[in-house]
């Protein structure tokens, strides 16, 4: 007989995270962080990167990493010892009122989801590398929130649109229903994070899973791959019919630790909007292991421990694995920085494209790792525009004058549709009986997905804070160091 059950997807590991699509997958924990440094062997090979990355993977990560050098490592900061791949993404900073920054705590390391979406999924080929996202984007011209995928057409279904819809910023409150993954494509402002996201914010990024079947890399590290029609799943475009493993990164940042502080959150590339979030990947799995995993690791639990292909190491061992920071960057403090972001990057709100890169101090007169003079002044003109929202223009100046004016911000609450999935599954139960029909024992089969029901409700998805322009310059040199305690528990099985 068949026993049909309704599962609470908020408590079923990972099903809610991927909009109710119950496919085979495994969730690779990288509880350690191999390093925090201005390194990016894909976009800036052989030199220091212009912004800081949080890096997960082996201890051989460097300015010139490739598959062979990664495989030569002695350890990895991830759970599966046969995986020497490199995973990296920009770090998140909090910028205080005086312009000083400090890195936000990264909770639980990183999770890399390996999702087996599509038909005839293959492992990554040898020497495969790719990048997701665009570090210079500062706008989003598509509807907010996303309409149902069945309504995507024309330019809204283009690769340019799909690339931006592959970013997510999930407000975490484990006492409430979980938000859908990739449901919000911009970083909420601090007011919204303080009021709603008591367990922090989860950065999410989906990599392309449609491959041209020939090139393991391309000049921009993107052109050899493409997104399927609904970002995570769907149909691959012409010329990219080969389906590789779908890769999805999650990182949680403890934004709530700054609840009572004045300032703003900025990604290390100078992006306060989230539109320029991105991530990088270099394949470093031991030869043949990923191929075995694609065929055998299909348990819907998603636990790497439930697949005998993998050799698992402890969290303590994951946290021990660190790479050596190059001499060029050894003396740079990337955990805190006076007067701005590490490398003195200008914070750029957009909506204009943020290239070429801007600095608060001319690079020709400043050595790497040396912060700008405290007497320097900077003026930033900001224009923020989100789809369907009123543009906000703010002017901020810094100097050594005494504060003479305090702005009174006003907050507008932005509502949008939030979709939740309910997954119905079946389990086959066999009852063994004797000759008189008396039950003797039962045998239970595995879970099979029957259907998924989507429900939509309207709720607040973000806020827009409008701050009047100051009539006088403000003193931005007072720095507070107090932190608010934040619980680090994980809920809903997402991390």
Image: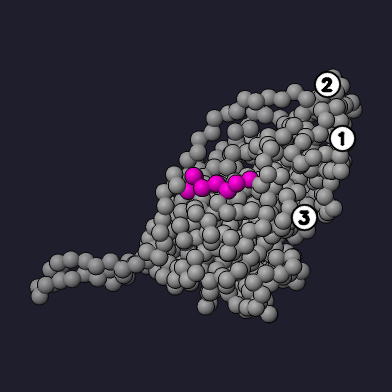
- Among the 4 quarters of the image, the one containing residue 367: top right
Image height of 307 relative to 190, above or below:
below
- Residue carrying label 2: 403
Q: Which residue is mark 3?
A: 137
For the residues labelled 1 and 2, the Cα–Cα distance comes to 16 Å
The nearer-to-camera label among 1 and 2 is: 1
Residue 297 versus residue 161: which sits nearer the camera?
A: 297
**Which residue lies at the image location 68% right of the left edge and 24% below the top edge?**
480
Q: Judging from the image, what secondary structure is the residue with disc 2 in?
A: loop
In the image, which disc is placed on residue 22?
A: none
Residue drawn 58% across the image and 28% down it: 484
Residue in the image at 57% along x and 71% along y:
126
Q: How far is mark 2 from mark 3, CA to CA?
A: 34 Å
Q: Earlier in the sequence, mark 1 or mark 2?
A: 1
Q: Earlier in the sequence, mark 3 or mark 1?
A: 3
Q: Is residue 132 above or below residue 384?
A: below
Q: Which mark is residue 378?
A: 1
Q: Earlier in the sequence, mark 2 or mark 3?
A: 3
Measured from the top left, where is residue 163 in percent x and y?
70, 63
Q: Nearer the viewer, mark 3 or mark 1?
A: 1
User: What residue is rendered at 75% in x and 23% in y?
Assistant: 478
Residue 22 horizontal/vertical position (percent): 48, 65
Answer whether residue 235 is visible to the viewer in this image.
yes
- Residue 55 in magenta stretch: no
Q: Nearer the viewer, residue 21 or 479?
A: 479
The span picked out in magenta is 318-325
Residues at marks 3 and 1, CA–CA distance in whole angstroms? 23 Å
């Amino acid at each position: 007989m068949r026993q049909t059950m309704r599962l609470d997807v908020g408590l079923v590991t990972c099903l809610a995270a991927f909009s109710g699509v119950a496919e085979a997958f495994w969730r690779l924990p990288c509880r350690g962080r191999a390093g925090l440094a201005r390194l990016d062997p894909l976009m800036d090979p052989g030199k220091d990167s212009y912004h800081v990355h949080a890096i997960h993977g082996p201890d051989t990560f460097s300015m010139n990493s490739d598959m062979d050098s990664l495989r030569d490592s002695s350890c990895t900061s991830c759970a599966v010892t046969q995986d020497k791949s490199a995973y990296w993404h920009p770090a998140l900073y909090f910028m205080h009122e005086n312009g000083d920054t400090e890195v936000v705590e990264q909770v639980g390391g990183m999770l890399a989801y390996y999702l087996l979406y599509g038909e005839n999924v293959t492992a990554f080929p040898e020497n495969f590398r790719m990048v997701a996202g665009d570090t210079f984007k500062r706008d989003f011209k598509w509807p907010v929130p996303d309409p149902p995928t069945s309504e995507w057409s024309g330019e809204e279904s283009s690769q340019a649109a799909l690339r931006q819809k592959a970013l997510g910023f999930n407000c975490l409150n484990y006492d409430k229903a979980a938000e859908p993954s990739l449901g919000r494509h911009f970083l909420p402002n601090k007011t919204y994070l303080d009021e709603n996201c008591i367990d922090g914010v989860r950065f999410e990024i989906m990599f392309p899973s449609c491959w041209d079947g020939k090139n393991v890399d391309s000049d921009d590290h993107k052109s050899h791959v493409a997104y399927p029609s609904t970002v995570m799943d769907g149909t691959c475009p012409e010329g990219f019919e080969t389906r590789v493993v779908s890769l999805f990164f999650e990182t949680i940042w403890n934004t709530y630790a700054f609840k009572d502080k004045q300032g703003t959150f900025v990604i290390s590339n100078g992006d306060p909007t989230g539109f320029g979030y991105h991530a990088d990947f270099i394949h470093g799995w031991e030869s043949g292991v990923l191929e075995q995993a694609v065929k055998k690791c299909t348990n819907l639990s998603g636990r790497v421990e439930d697949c005998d292909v993998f050799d698992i190491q402890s969290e303590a061992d994951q946290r021990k694995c660190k790479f050596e920071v190059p001499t060029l960057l050894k003396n740079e403090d990337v955990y805190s920085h006076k007067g701005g972001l590490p490398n003195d990057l200008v914070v750029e709100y957009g909506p204009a494209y943020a290239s070429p890169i801007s600095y608060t101090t001319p690079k020709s007169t400043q050595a790497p790792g040396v912060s700008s003079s405290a007497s320097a002044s900077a003026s930033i003109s900001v224009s923020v525009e989100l789809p369907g929202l009123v543009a906000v223009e703010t002017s901020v100046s810094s100097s050594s004058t005494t504060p003479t004016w305090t702005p009174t911000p006003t907050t507008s609450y932005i509502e949008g549709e939030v979709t939740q999935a309910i997954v119905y599954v079946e389990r086959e139960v066999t009852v063994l009986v004797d000759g008189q029909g008396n039950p003797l024992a039962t045998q239970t089969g595995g879970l099979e997905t029957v259907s998924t029901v989507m429900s939509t409700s309207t709720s607040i998805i973000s806020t827009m804070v409008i701050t009047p322009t100051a009539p006088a310059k403000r003193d931005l040199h007072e720095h507070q160091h107090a932190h608010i305690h934040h619980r680090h528990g994980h809920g809903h099985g997402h991390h």
